[in-house]
Image (cartoon, rainbow, N blue to C red):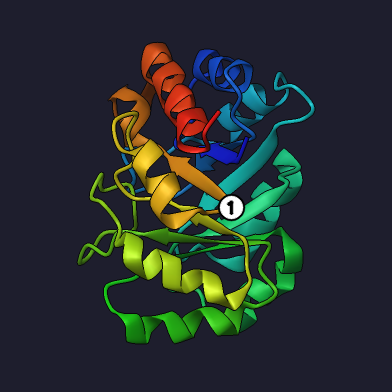
Amino acid sequence: MIFVKICGITRLKDAIIAADLGARALGFNFYKKSKRYIQPKKAVKIIEQLPGHILKVGLFVNSPKDEIENINSRLDLDLLQFHGDEPPNFCEKWGDKVIRAFRIESENQLEEIKKYSFARMIIIDAAIAGRFGGTGELSDWDLAVKAKKYGIPLLLAGGLTPKNVSEAIQRVKPFGVDVAGGVESSPGIKDKEKIRAFMHSVRRGQGH
């Protein structure tokens, strides 16, 4: 099955359900203005009880380097997701632990991806003025297809739900998908049946 990342985890219960239902990675949002923000000390308690095969992802938006380093070492994160305006020379310090998110509105923005060739993965998300992801708005799937030409594993994000993820996978053929609001009952609170339906749709999108 393709790589599935469930982002905005705030409760241990949701983390265990997501892992049991087939998620490969779980995202913890350390952007204080987000509705899905989690305090690092709370995230530690969840991470300590996760199965070993789950990749732990920390999401940051324009955070100071010291803060990222502190959280990264405390939580023993596997991947660091940069979702703000972080330049390549800032992200490069963490090398292949980096997931770089792009909020793409037009084809000429795709060139920016080349500057992050060191990244483990990139995320193509919806571009909403003044918002750093988590909007529930659909990203541009045609631009996501074009973003694949840079050869970096691509996670498709932006408004994915159990109803549309199957089509998204068939259209974009991404390395993986990234979901938050599409499997929630309210921001930061995951819904078991929505996660189950999402994973079922992921498999259907791959022809399984």
Left or right, 74 with reference to 7: right
Relative height, residue 185 to residue 112 (above, below): above
**Farthest residue in the left direction?**
129
Closest to the observer, 110 or 2 = 2
Closest to the observer, 20 or 135 = 20
Residue shown at the point (65%, 78%) measured from the top left: 117
Relative height, residue 78 to residue 153 (above, below): above
Left or right, 139 with reference to 71: left
In x, y percent, where is residue 192? 42, 13
Q: How many marks?
A: 1
**Farthest residue in the right direction?**
52
> Quick one: quadrant of the C terminus?
top right
Secondary element at image label 1: loop
In x, y percent, where is residue 95? 74, 69
Q: Name the residue carrying label 1.
A: 175
Q: Residues within 10 Å of mark 1 (few under 14, many from 20)?
A: some
Relative height, residue 2 to residue 20 (above, below): below
Name which quarter of the figure residue 184 lies in: top left
- Residue type of the residue flagged with mark 1: Phe
Res 72 seen here = yes
Closest to the observer, 86 or 73 = 86
In x, y percent, where is residue 17? 55, 15
Res 10 seen here = no
In x, y percent, where is residue 15? 56, 22
Residue shown at the point (50%, 18%) measured from the top left: 14
**Farthest residue in the front direction?**
207
Residue shown at the point (62%, 16%) measured from the top left: 20
Residue shown at the point (27%, 73%) measured from the top left: 105
> Quick one: quadrant of the N terminus?
top right
Relative height, residue 113 to residue 135 (above, below): below
